Protein backbone atom coordinates (compact mmCIF):
# COMPACT_ATOMS: atom_id res chain seq x y z
CA UNK A 1 0.00 0.00 0.00
CA UNK A 2 1.30 3.43 -0.97
CA UNK A 3 1.90 6.46 1.25
CA UNK A 4 0.32 9.70 0.06
CA UNK A 5 3.46 11.83 0.14
CA UNK A 6 1.54 14.98 -0.78
CA UNK A 7 -0.78 14.57 2.19
CA UNK A 8 2.24 13.88 4.36
CA UNK A 9 3.97 17.10 3.27
CA UNK A 10 0.81 19.15 3.81
CA UNK A 11 0.58 17.78 7.37
CA UNK A 12 4.13 19.10 7.88
CA UNK A 13 3.07 22.56 6.69
CA UNK A 14 4.99 22.37 3.42
CA UNK A 15 3.80 23.85 0.12
CA UNK A 16 3.17 21.27 -2.61
CA UNK A 17 3.09 21.79 -6.36
CA UNK A 18 1.03 19.93 -8.94
CA UNK A 19 0.67 20.03 -12.70
CA UNK A 20 -2.78 19.83 -14.29
CA UNK A 21 -2.96 17.39 -17.20
CA UNK A 22 -6.23 17.10 -19.12
CA UNK A 23 -5.22 14.55 -21.75
CA UNK A 24 -3.97 10.97 -21.72
CA UNK A 25 -0.25 11.70 -21.39
CA UNK A 26 1.53 9.27 -19.02
CA UNK A 27 4.91 10.56 -20.18
CA UNK A 28 4.03 14.06 -19.00
CA UNK A 29 3.09 12.63 -15.60
CA UNK A 30 6.46 10.91 -15.45
CA UNK A 31 8.24 14.13 -16.41
CA UNK A 32 6.53 16.07 -13.61
CA UNK A 33 7.62 13.38 -11.20
CA UNK A 34 11.17 13.41 -12.54
CA UNK A 35 11.55 17.17 -12.08
CA UNK A 36 10.25 16.96 -8.52
CA UNK A 37 6.62 18.06 -8.61
CA UNK A 38 4.60 16.65 -5.72
CA UNK A 39 1.39 15.64 -7.46
CA UNK A 40 -0.43 15.54 -10.76
CA UNK A 41 -4.03 16.69 -11.17
CA UNK A 42 -5.57 14.32 -13.70
CA UNK A 43 -8.27 16.63 -15.02
CA UNK A 44 -11.45 14.79 -15.94
CA UNK A 45 -13.74 17.75 -15.42
CA UNK A 46 -12.50 19.49 -18.55
CA UNK A 47 -10.38 16.71 -20.05
CA UNK A 48 -11.59 13.85 -22.29
CA UNK A 49 -9.93 10.87 -20.56
CA UNK A 50 -11.81 7.66 -19.83
CA UNK A 51 -11.21 5.58 -16.71
CA UNK A 52 -8.84 3.14 -18.40
CA UNK A 53 -6.65 6.07 -19.42
CA UNK A 54 -6.85 7.49 -15.91
CA UNK A 55 -5.55 4.18 -14.58
CA UNK A 56 -2.52 4.37 -16.89
CA UNK A 57 -1.87 7.93 -15.70
CA UNK A 58 -1.97 6.64 -12.12
CA UNK A 59 0.53 3.90 -12.95
CA UNK A 60 2.90 6.49 -14.41
CA UNK A 61 2.58 8.56 -11.24
CA UNK A 62 3.31 5.59 -9.02
CA UNK A 63 6.45 4.67 -10.97
CA UNK A 64 7.87 8.19 -10.70
CA UNK A 65 6.86 8.84 -7.09
CA UNK A 66 4.31 11.59 -7.71
CA UNK A 67 0.87 11.61 -6.08
CA UNK A 68 -2.01 10.94 -8.51
CA UNK A 69 -5.06 13.11 -7.80
CA UNK A 70 -8.10 13.30 -10.08
CA UNK A 71 -10.38 16.24 -10.65
CA UNK A 72 -13.68 14.42 -11.07
CA UNK A 73 -16.49 15.70 -13.32
CA UNK A 74 -19.28 15.78 -10.71
CA UNK A 75 -20.26 15.13 -7.09
CA UNK A 76 -21.92 11.76 -7.58
CA UNK A 77 -20.74 9.06 -5.12
CA UNK A 78 -20.44 6.50 -7.92
CA UNK A 79 -18.19 8.87 -9.86
CA UNK A 80 -15.91 9.45 -6.89
CA UNK A 81 -15.85 5.70 -6.19
CA UNK A 82 -14.79 4.73 -9.71
CA UNK A 83 -11.90 7.19 -9.75
CA UNK A 84 -10.66 6.12 -6.32
CA UNK A 85 -10.87 2.48 -7.36
CA UNK A 86 -8.45 3.28 -10.19
CA UNK A 87 -5.88 4.08 -7.50
CA UNK A 88 -5.91 7.88 -7.35
CA UNK A 89 -4.91 9.10 -3.90
CA UNK A 90 -7.20 12.09 -3.86
CA UNK A 91 -10.18 13.69 -5.53
CA UNK A 92 -10.64 17.34 -6.39
CA UNK A 93 -14.35 18.07 -6.66
CA UNK A 94 -15.54 21.15 -8.57
CA UNK A 95 -18.25 23.61 -7.55
CA UNK A 96 -18.75 22.62 -3.92
CA UNK A 97 -20.86 25.47 -2.58
CA UNK A 98 -22.36 24.32 0.72
CA UNK A 99 -21.39 22.41 3.83
CA UNK A 100 -23.87 19.68 2.91
CA UNK A 101 -22.17 19.21 -0.46
CA UNK A 102 -18.72 19.10 1.17
CA UNK A 103 -19.91 16.54 3.71
CA UNK A 104 -21.41 14.35 0.97
CA UNK A 105 -18.15 14.43 -0.97
CA UNK A 106 -16.07 13.53 2.09
CA UNK A 107 -18.42 10.70 2.97
CA UNK A 108 -18.34 9.28 -0.56
CA UNK A 109 -14.53 9.23 -0.58
CA UNK A 110 -14.01 7.22 2.63
CA UNK A 111 -14.97 3.85 4.03
CA UNK A 112 -16.83 3.09 7.24
CA UNK A 113 -16.74 4.46 9.91
CA UNK A 114 -15.82 7.80 8.24
CA UNK A 115 -17.95 7.33 5.16
CA UNK A 116 -19.83 4.94 2.91
CA UNK A 117 -17.49 4.38 -0.04
CA UNK A 118 -18.30 1.11 -1.80
CA UNK A 119 -15.77 -1.64 -1.08
CA UNK A 120 -14.00 -3.17 -4.08
CA UNK A 121 -11.08 -5.56 -4.45
CA UNK A 122 -9.03 -3.97 -7.19
CA UNK A 123 -5.79 -2.08 -7.49
CA UNK A 124 -6.55 0.43 -4.73
CA UNK A 125 -6.38 -2.55 -2.32
CA UNK A 126 -3.39 -4.18 -4.08
CA UNK A 127 -5.86 -6.74 -5.38
CA UNK A 128 -6.31 -8.12 -1.83
CA UNK A 129 -2.93 -9.82 -1.97
CA UNK A 130 -1.57 -10.36 1.55
CA UNK A 131 -3.88 -7.65 2.92
CA UNK A 132 -6.66 -7.66 5.48
CA UNK A 133 -9.71 -5.73 4.28
CA UNK A 134 -10.23 -3.89 7.56
CA UNK A 135 -6.62 -2.74 7.47
CA UNK A 136 -6.66 -1.60 3.85
CA UNK A 137 -9.89 0.39 4.23
CA UNK A 138 -8.48 2.14 7.27
CA UNK A 139 -5.20 2.84 5.47
CA UNK A 140 -6.97 4.29 2.44
CA UNK A 141 -9.14 6.48 4.67
CA UNK A 142 -5.93 7.94 6.13
CA UNK A 143 -4.13 8.38 2.80
CA UNK A 144 -6.94 9.81 0.64
CA UNK A 145 -7.09 13.56 0.03
CA UNK A 146 -10.56 15.10 -0.25
CA UNK A 147 -10.40 18.49 -1.93
CA UNK A 148 -13.57 20.52 -2.57
CA UNK A 149 -13.14 23.48 -4.90
CA UNK A 150 -14.19 26.95 -3.75
CA UNK A 151 -14.91 28.57 -7.09
CA UNK A 152 -18.24 30.35 -6.82
CA UNK A 153 -19.40 33.33 -4.78
CA UNK A 154 -21.91 31.04 -3.03
CA UNK A 155 -19.03 28.92 -1.73
CA UNK A 156 -17.22 32.02 -0.46
CA UNK A 157 -20.40 33.14 1.31
CA UNK A 158 -20.78 29.67 2.90
CA UNK A 159 -17.10 29.24 3.70
CA UNK A 160 -17.42 29.37 7.49
CA UNK A 161 -19.88 26.44 7.41
CA UNK A 162 -17.80 24.48 4.90
CA UNK A 163 -14.75 24.90 7.14
CA UNK A 164 -16.54 22.96 9.88
CA UNK A 165 -16.95 19.82 7.77
CA UNK A 166 -14.90 16.85 8.96
CA UNK A 167 -13.04 14.83 6.36
CA UNK A 168 -12.13 17.75 4.10
CA UNK A 169 -8.35 17.96 3.68
CA UNK A 170 -7.86 20.95 1.36
CA UNK A 171 -10.14 23.77 0.22
CA UNK A 172 -8.96 24.67 -3.27
CA UNK A 173 -9.73 28.25 -4.34
CA UNK A 174 -9.81 28.59 -8.13
CA UNK A 175 -9.78 31.96 -9.85
CA UNK A 176 -11.32 31.34 -13.28
CA UNK A 177 -14.83 30.22 -12.33
CA UNK A 178 -14.78 32.42 -9.24
CA UNK A 179 -14.10 35.44 -11.44
CA UNK A 180 -17.06 34.54 -13.64
CA UNK A 181 -19.32 33.90 -10.64
CA UNK A 182 -18.42 37.32 -9.22
CA UNK A 183 -19.42 39.02 -12.48
CA UNK A 184 -15.92 39.42 -13.95
CA UNK A 185 -14.57 42.18 -11.68
CA UNK A 186 -11.05 43.58 -12.23
CA UNK A 187 -8.21 41.09 -11.58
CA UNK A 188 -7.02 43.07 -8.56
CA UNK A 189 -10.41 42.63 -6.89
CA UNK A 190 -10.43 38.88 -7.61
CA UNK A 191 -6.92 38.59 -6.16
CA UNK A 192 -8.05 40.45 -3.03
CA UNK A 193 -10.99 38.07 -2.54
CA UNK A 194 -8.79 35.01 -3.10
CA UNK A 195 -6.17 36.25 -0.67
CA UNK A 196 -8.85 36.99 1.91
CA UNK A 197 -10.39 33.54 1.39
CA UNK A 198 -7.01 31.83 1.79
CA UNK A 199 -6.51 33.74 5.04
CA UNK A 200 -9.89 32.61 6.36
CA UNK A 201 -9.09 28.98 5.54
CA UNK A 202 -5.70 29.16 7.23
CA UNK A 203 -7.15 30.94 10.29
CA UNK A 204 -9.58 28.04 10.71
CA UNK A 205 -6.67 25.60 10.83
CA UNK A 206 -7.43 24.09 7.42
CA UNK A 207 -5.27 23.78 4.29
CA UNK A 208 -5.86 26.22 1.42
CA UNK A 209 -5.10 25.58 -2.22
CA UNK A 210 -4.93 27.99 -5.15
CA UNK A 211 -5.65 27.21 -8.79
CA UNK A 212 -5.93 29.14 -12.02
CA UNK A 213 -2.36 30.36 -11.61
CA UNK A 214 -0.42 31.97 -14.43
CA UNK A 215 2.83 30.12 -15.26
CA UNK A 216 4.69 33.45 -15.20
CA UNK A 217 3.10 35.05 -12.12
CA UNK A 218 5.89 33.98 -9.81
CA UNK A 219 5.49 36.86 -7.36
CA UNK A 220 1.70 36.52 -7.23
CA UNK A 221 1.83 32.80 -6.45
CA UNK A 222 4.56 33.35 -3.86
CA UNK A 223 2.42 36.07 -2.27
CA UNK A 224 -0.49 33.65 -1.88
CA UNK A 225 1.80 30.99 -0.43
CA UNK A 226 3.07 33.59 2.04
CA UNK A 227 -0.59 34.32 2.84
CA UNK A 228 -1.12 30.66 3.76
CA UNK A 229 -1.84 28.66 0.59
CA UNK A 230 -0.02 25.32 0.49
CA UNK A 231 -1.63 23.32 -2.36
CA UNK A 232 -0.61 24.89 -5.68
CA UNK A 233 -1.77 23.82 -9.15
CA UNK A 234 -0.59 24.97 -12.57
CA UNK A 235 -1.55 23.87 -16.08
CA UNK A 236 1.14 21.60 -17.53
CA UNK A 237 0.40 22.94 -21.02
CA UNK A 238 0.91 26.46 -19.67
CA UNK A 239 4.36 25.46 -18.45
CA UNK A 240 5.07 23.90 -21.85
CA UNK A 241 3.94 27.06 -23.65
CA UNK A 242 6.14 29.30 -21.52
CA UNK A 243 9.14 27.03 -21.98
CA UNK A 244 8.59 26.86 -25.74
CA UNK A 245 8.29 30.64 -26.05
CA UNK A 246 11.30 31.24 -23.82
CA UNK A 247 13.54 28.91 -25.86
CA UNK A 248 12.58 30.49 -29.17
CA UNK A 249 12.90 34.06 -27.90
CA UNK A 250 16.23 33.51 -26.14
CA UNK A 251 17.73 31.84 -29.21
CA UNK A 252 16.60 34.72 -31.41
CA UNK A 253 18.23 37.19 -29.02
CA UNK A 254 21.61 35.57 -29.73
CA UNK A 255 21.35 35.32 -33.52
CA UNK A 256 23.90 37.26 -35.50
CA UNK A 257 22.41 39.96 -37.74
CA UNK A 258 22.06 38.83 -41.33
CA UNK A 259 23.55 40.82 -44.11
CA UNK A 260 21.08 42.34 -46.50
CA UNK A 261 21.64 42.31 -50.26
Image (cartoon, rainbow, N blue to C red):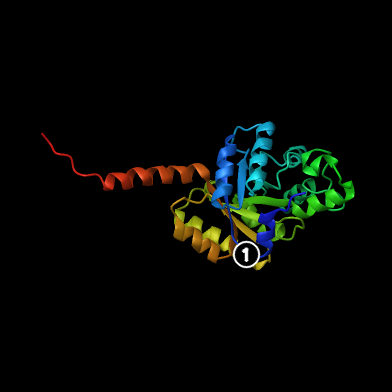
User: Is residue 130 visible to the viewer in this orientation of the structure?
Assistant: yes
Q: Is residue 230 above or below residue 154?
A: below
Residue at the image position 28 percent from the left and 44 percent from the top: 252
Seen in the picture, residue 131 relative to 9 is either above or below; the reply is above
Give the position of the C terminus as an image quadrant. Answer: top left
Q: Mark 1: which secondary structure?
A: helix
The percent position of residue 74, horizontal first and vertical second, equals 69, 39
Label count reads 1
Q: Residue at x 85, y 42 (%)?
A: 129
For the residue pair 134 and 64, the one nearer the viewer reads as 64
Residue beneath disc 1:
200
Name of the residue lying farthest toward the left: 261
Q: Picture quarter containing residue 9? A: bottom right
Q: Is residue 97 above or below residue 166?
A: above
The residue under the point 88% across, 46% down is 133
Q: How far from the left and from the top, in percent, is residue 199? A: 59, 65
Residue 116 percent coordinates (x, y): 84, 46
Q: Residues within 10 Å of mark 1 (few under 14, many from 20)?
A: some
- In this view, which residue lies farthest toward the bottom? 203
Whether residue 170 is visible here, answered yes or no, is no
Q: Position of residue 88 (x, y in %)?
A: 70, 44
Seen at 72% across and 39% down, the residue is 83
State the image quarter where residue 219 is shown: bottom left
Of residues 102 and 28, the one drawn nearer to the viewer in this rendering:
28
Decide if residue 209 is on the left or right side of residue 241: right
Amino acid sequence: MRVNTTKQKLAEGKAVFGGIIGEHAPGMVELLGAVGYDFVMIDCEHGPMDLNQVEHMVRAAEVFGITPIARVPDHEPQTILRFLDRGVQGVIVPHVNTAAEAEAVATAARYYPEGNRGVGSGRAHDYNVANVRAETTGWLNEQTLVIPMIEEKEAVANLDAILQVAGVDVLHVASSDLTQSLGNPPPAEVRRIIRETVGRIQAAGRVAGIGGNSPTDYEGVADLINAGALFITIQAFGLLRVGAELFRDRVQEHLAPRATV
